[in-house]
Image (spheres, helix red, strand yellow):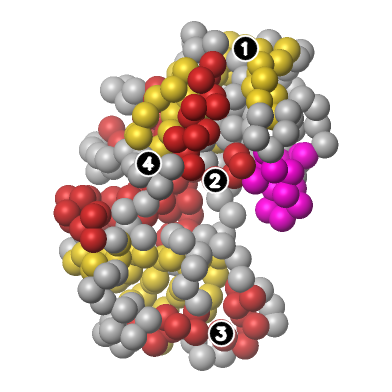
Amino acid sequence: MKVIDLVDKTSTKVGETTKPSPKKGEVLVKVAYSALDTAFDEVAHRSFIPGSLLHNLKVKPLVAGWHYSGTVESVVAGVNNLKIGDAVFGHLQYASTTRQGTLADYITVLASECAKIPEGVAMDVAAAVTTEALTALQGMRDQGGLSEGKIILIIAAGGGVGTQAVQIAKAMKARTVHAVCSTKDVIKVGKLGADLVIDRAQKDITNDLEAGSYDVIFDTTGKYSFVKLRYALKKKGILVSTVPNVTTFPPVSLLIAISGKRSKSLMVRCNRKDLELVGTWMKSDEIHSVPIDNVYNIKDIQTARERQKDPKKSGRVVIKVGDGW
């Protein structure tokens, strides 16, 4: 099968490797679409941290890509929830044990780590939504404890994770959703459903928020410290970051918890239950915005990589794998 081989940190080539065979509990997926994210360059550059935590860097050929949508081509005995021909979506795990990539004709995935694409959802959109939506859901619900009636502040609400976080927080029936974004994104974020949009150019959120007002603060940038934002949390409030830091690990996290407030981080994990929930929200239009900047044929991967780095990019850079060579 064809793959995109990461030759070095800047160049790629079309390579050939053996078509994988599904093992117990797995299905073989013919990839239709993939997408680029910040993890791609970390792996291409073979960075020890975080690259080695996102993918096995010693495997050859080194094939990256995590997002995917595609069609089930074969099913191992014992897999009962999927059948040949089903359209599925998900993402490979960001882990040092991951040896394959979705910039390839085929991948094998556990049936418990993918889900059927809801009727009416396009395959490119399904590929684009996966990591961002699951990061938002798991960050707010599992780490932040967000539930009906709670108040949340979402930082960088105009970004990929932030866009999904605003919509998902509303779908989860949060009482109030406040969102911080850049000036250019204020109108867009308002349309996502935020109850209050804060222009970061007009307000310093490290000083000017109402004290003790949020059950959850979700920092999708990972750039804000617990020390700077704890004043805005309620007594038992939680700051969730997409990037681990000293306050999210013992012993510092334990010392912080004495105050009643907590600092947490997450590493997204793909699973069928959460994908199905996201799919339900997409079908009901509660997730109605999945921004895609552009779709590139896989043969144009270098052009797509350049666009991924462009600060003017707006939305996910999606790669058409099927019929894109």
Q: Which residue is mark 1?
A: 74
Q: Which numbered dot is residue 38?
A: 2
* Residue 300 seen: yes
Across and down, in percent, residue 239 comes to: 46, 73
Going from the N terminus, do you reach mark 2 or mark 1 first? 2
Amino acid found under the numbered disc labelled 4: Lys
Q: What's the magenta region? A: 42-57
Give the quadrant of the C terminus.
top right
Q: Which residue is mark 4?
A: 313
Amino acid found under the numbered disc labelled 2: Thr
Going from the N terminus, do you reach mark 1 or mark 3 first? 1
| Tag 2–tag 4 contact (CB < 8 Å) | no
3D distance between C-alphas at marks 2 and 1: 31 Å
Give the quadrant of the N terminus.
top right
Name the residue located 74 percent from the left edge and 22 percent from the top edge: 23
Name the residue located 55 percent from the left edge and 70 percent from the top edge: 264
Q: Which residue is mark 3?
A: 257
Going from the N terminus, do you reach mark 3 or mark 2 first? 2
Name the residue located 27 percent from the left edge and 40 percent from the top edge: 289
Going from the N terminus, do you reach mark 2 or mark 4 first? 2
* Residue 152 seen: no
Q: Nearer the viewer, mark 2 or mark 4?
A: 4
Q: Nearer the viewer, mark 3 or mark 2?
A: 2
| Tag 1–tag 4 contact (CB < 8 Å) | no
